[in-house]
Amino acid sequence: MWLIKIFTLILSVAATMDERLEGYDVAAKQPDLSYRLGEAELTTLDEIGFLITPSRKESIYEVYSGYTESPYTPVFISADLPFHTLHMMVDYTVRIIEIEELLPKLETLTSGMLEYTEKEYKRAPKELREAAKINYIYFAVAARLLELDVDVKDKDCAKKVETELERIDKHSGIERISFMDDVTEDYSQYVPRGHYTRSDDFRRYFRTMMWYGRLPLKVPDNHSDPKEYLQAAMLMGIHLDDDAELNGLWEDIYEPTAFFFGAAEDLTPGLLIAEAREFFSDDISGNTLTNEDRMHEFAAYLAENNQPKIISGFVPSPETEEPVKIPVTVRFMPQRFVPDSYIFSELVFDKVRAYRGEGKPFTLGQTQLGPRRVFPRGLDLLAVLRWNIAYQILTDEGDTDYENYKEQFEKMMKWYAGLSPRDKESAIYFRWFDFFLTYKDGSAPPRVDDTAWERKKLVTSLGSWAELRHDAILYAKQSYTGYAMAAEPGEEPPPPPPLHLAAVEDAGGLYARMAECARTIAEFLDSDDPEHPIAETYLYFSEVMDKLDILSHKQREGLSPAEHKWLWTVAGKLSYMPSMLGKVVTGEEDERAALAADVHTDPNSGLVLEEATGDPARLYVIVEIEGKPYVARGGTYTYYEFKHPISERLTDEAWHDLLDSSNRPDMPSWTDPITVNR
């Protein structure tokens, strides 16, 4: 929490310091900083070479816009600026695609599937009637979520449709699905959040795609499990396979979302039919579907070849020698496999066992089996990406003191390191993790403490990751824990002519990787329509990133006056890019950069893990320009990680209210050494 403190300004304090400032009198040389940097700020600058302090601005572009008028102080282009801009561009691009292309196709696809399943239910033989009924109810609910005209005449089906809609409207938590008695769903997931609160069309799209992405048709694990769910999935897949128009609509929705957010790990209808043709030698007639022995043999074949990695729902987990087996399921339009959810699944109960430490670390929660690691942390993700400081903080705060954590952690490090370049570039979402790896190699400015700067880079990376999860809130398959059973003061002085000096954060190869990613998106979205110049905007972003990459290396030898002046324009250039993409549905909440995304669910405590960014902060850092020291200023993320009730998954609107209240959560304690709250 930003604490309000009043510091006595001692202008001469810098002159007495002889460490990183080396006698440089900030107040005398850069008087526009005099009211911003009091004793506490100058002490932190002298000790570690930089500091983060609140800005009271709603976007990072606002933070930088005030700097353009400064006559004394260089601007510092932090990696946060392109990270945030690329997030905004991807988010706005996805919005345009969803409203202009995907929603109309989703309506047509759903209408076609509902019409087919209604006819099939009426004519289905006795052996397949229950499976046909499941499909009819399933698509009737989807059609109602899209607010299409639906008349369900069968009284029992109509009752179950209404039951499902009521649970979705109430976000009622984990309950058994009314038309699949032994299958549960977490109805709290149907709270529209992310950008899906911005219009009624977004809300319709969100709830329907969440339904298609999460509702599981379970492949039977043994002969006692119902076979109707697999039969229903087969009927669904057969119809899609037979209807070229509907199958084309399905692919038109899946492919662009897979480009941005990745492929599904659960079986899709198309993959199911491909597996069935292989197993049954192309005989997928009604006789095959009603042959109980053959269907169970097929189920065993599917389980052997399609085992998912992420627990994404309520899975009872008695603690045994072997972790619980994740059910194999078919979903109409599955949520996507993302590496962070897999890592989280592997670093909580039941993959990680009993607590062996003392105290109450963030990850600890009570279960019927006693204290267990029921929550992951964002730091787990960066530690797996070999950020040593992230693992050190986890260790210092007791979050690694669990039986089997080290083994699971090493397993995840080896898994990620073993991914092929093709895997790491398979979706824009996956490329973000390569950004973090590349950014890790960036160096601190010469006078800055390396270890402290690593914490700043953690804030930047985790802030960007929170934005990524916000963008993917609908598509990313969320991990679950197994359920264990048992007004700034003063006026600036009259300015002399502008200084127009600048420095760029050394971010390793990050800017070049972002340029490459932007060109990939431009190629995928290339369009001749001048009304939607999306590709051109991404190419413009790539040009700016390429130049930032060049200047970040060249600044070691010195930049020309024109290059310094160009760097002063970077924030302004980037700020316009999201709006250059075309017509985007936005709302009042988009004016504020702060956002939240729930990324993990623990049924044991009834809580979710929220990852969030707050209002951006000012970043002050000692830099050397042409051999002379300066205190430059830029902007950076603020980052929050906290638990919240499962029934109150946060929208951006609710997060803004919480952020502005006296109940706002604290930033993680590991950020304390690099922040001064004033």
Image (tube, grey):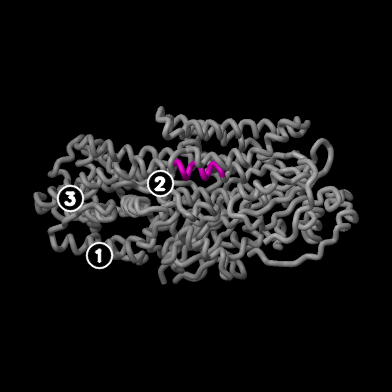
Real-space CA distance between mark 2 and mark 1, rounded to the nearest whole angstrom? 27 Å
Q: Earlier in the sequence, mark 3 or mark 2?
A: 3
Task: Tell me the distance, in whole angstroms, between the alpha carbons under discs 3 and 2.
Answer: 31 Å
Q: Which residue is mark 2?
A: 336
Q: Is residue 391 above or below residue 255?
A: below
Q: Which badge, 1 or 3, is on the more N-terminal residue?
A: 1
* Predominant SS of the magenta segment: helix
Rendered residue at 81%/58% (across/down): 43
Q: Nearer the viewer, residue 354 or 169?
A: 169
Q: Is residue 48 visible?
A: no
Amino acid, disc 3:
Glu
Residue 91 part of the magenta segment: yes
Q: Secondary structure at mark 2?
A: loop
Answer above or below: position of 203 versus 545.
Answer: below
**Point 37% across, 38% down: residue:** 255
Q: Kindly identify which residue carries mark 1.
A: 163
For mark 3, does the 10 Å Cα neighbourhood hold few (<14), some (14 to 19), or many (20 or more) residues?
A: few
Q: Residue 392 falls in which quadrant of the image?
A: bottom right
Where is residue 252 shown, x and y percent of the image? 32, 37
Q: Nearer the viewer, mark 2 or mark 1?
A: 1
Relative to the observer, which residue lies in front, 235 or 659? 659
Q: Which residue is mark 3?
A: 292
Magenta residues span: 85-93
